[in-house]
Amino acid sequence: MRRTWPKHKQAVEGLQMRRAVVFFAVLALAGCTTQGQHGAGGPAGRRTGIKLGMVTDVGGLGDKSFNDSANRGLQIAKAKDGAIVTVLQSRSVTDYEPNLSALATEGNALIFAIGFLMHDSLDSVAPRFPRTHFAIVDSIVDRPNVTSITFKEEESSFLAGALAGLVTKKGAVGFLGGIQSPLIEKFQAGFTAGVKSTDPAARVIVKYTGSFEDVGAGKEYATLLFRDADIVYAAAGKCGLGVIDEVKSLPRGDYVIGVDSDQDGLAPGKVLTSALKRVDNAVVQLADDAAHGHPPGGHIALGLKQGGVALTDFAYTKNVLPPGAVATLAAYRSAIIGGRFSVPSTLKELSAFNPPHLSARH
């Protein structure tokens, strides 16, 4: 469950939010200078040999989504700062605590816990290793040696939903979640709000697989959803690969919206866009901070404004977008960043949401 940030740190959170803008501005510059570097050494004088560890969420590496995004950042840090990296994969929730403890015992300076399901395990492990710094993605752990990173997934999901509302021909779209939880309901709420903003009459059909790793279940649920819907947004980890596999065999006009990583190339022309969650960027910047001895603490929240979430650029699907779609999405993006309206992040907020109509549907 999501925990409330303690009152005595609310002022600190404001500072952390301002830091987040710098966080990604610095990373953008760093990304420009690391192109083409190979191996563990990095540039002359930058080799640090810092030990970095990561514990994956269930689903592990190869999900082409959440865990792979985090690992991509870790591998960039390896090339950029000469880091020594260790990744331990979790097959079940019982692996979290022993994996975190093992990495701390091995002397890793910074350890990433990838996923909200690791909250309780990290909350237990962190106090036992006060000289080790940890970072958790998608949850808030109130410990002095933990950096908590959350994303405003509802904002990128809103843009994905707005696009789905503009593109759907059937007037029905699908949302497939993994394990139903406040985190995944952020995706659902934002997506539904976006759909209703560009096509108020459209239906949003919602299903949950109850898993983040069952590719077969993702494919089965996709079959059900595509009976009525022509676009399915899958926020379900590795289950989403099953949805993408299913859409490959469907007629022209049926699409998937990818999640977390850029999944557009997994089925070119059939993945309408991907709602990016830049876990890779966050990992790179925290690793760089740790390599220079200054890992930040507290809570950092990253949305559209901070460059933490985004949509891909329709590399394979520009030709299927209706006229004005890109401009409409840009208008919504600017309105969200400018604070003209807030995207609902819970189902309760969704029920009270009044969809803004910034552009007529073409």
Image (spheres, rainbow, N blue to C red):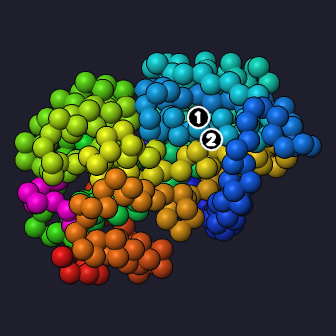
**Measured from the top left, where is residue 252 in percent x and y?**
15, 48
Whether residue 4 is visible here, answered yes or no, is: no
Whether residue 261 is visible here, answered yes or no, is: yes
Looking at this view, name the residue that lies furthest to the right: 45
Image quadrant containing the N terminus: top left
**Measured from the top left, where is residue 184 in percent x and y?**
36, 46
* Label placed on residue 71: 1
**Measured from the top left, where is residue 345 in percent x and y?**
37, 59
Q: Residue at x 11, y 60 (%)?
A: 169
**Measured from the top left, where is residue 342 in percent x and y?**
39, 72
Callout 2–callout 1 Cβ contact below 8 Å: yes
Out of 52 and 249, give the one closest to the viewer.
Answer: 249
* Label placed on residue 73: 2
Out of 59 and 268, give the one closest to the viewer.
Answer: 268
Left/right of residue 41 with respect to residue 306 in the rendered view: right
Out of 84 and 55, give the one closest to the viewer.
Answer: 84
Left/right of residue 253 with respect to residue 75 in the rendered view: left
Is residue 255 one of those drawn in magenta? no
Q: What is the magenta range?
A: 166-175
Is residue 171 one of those drawn in magenta? yes
Amino acid carrying label 2: it is Gly
Out of 2 and 171, give the one closest to the viewer.
Answer: 171
* Label placed on residue 361: none
Q: Please tell me how many numbered marks the rendered image carries.
A: 2
Q: Residue at x 84, y 31 (%)?
A: 49
Measure the alpha-carbon separation of dots 2 and 1: 5 Å
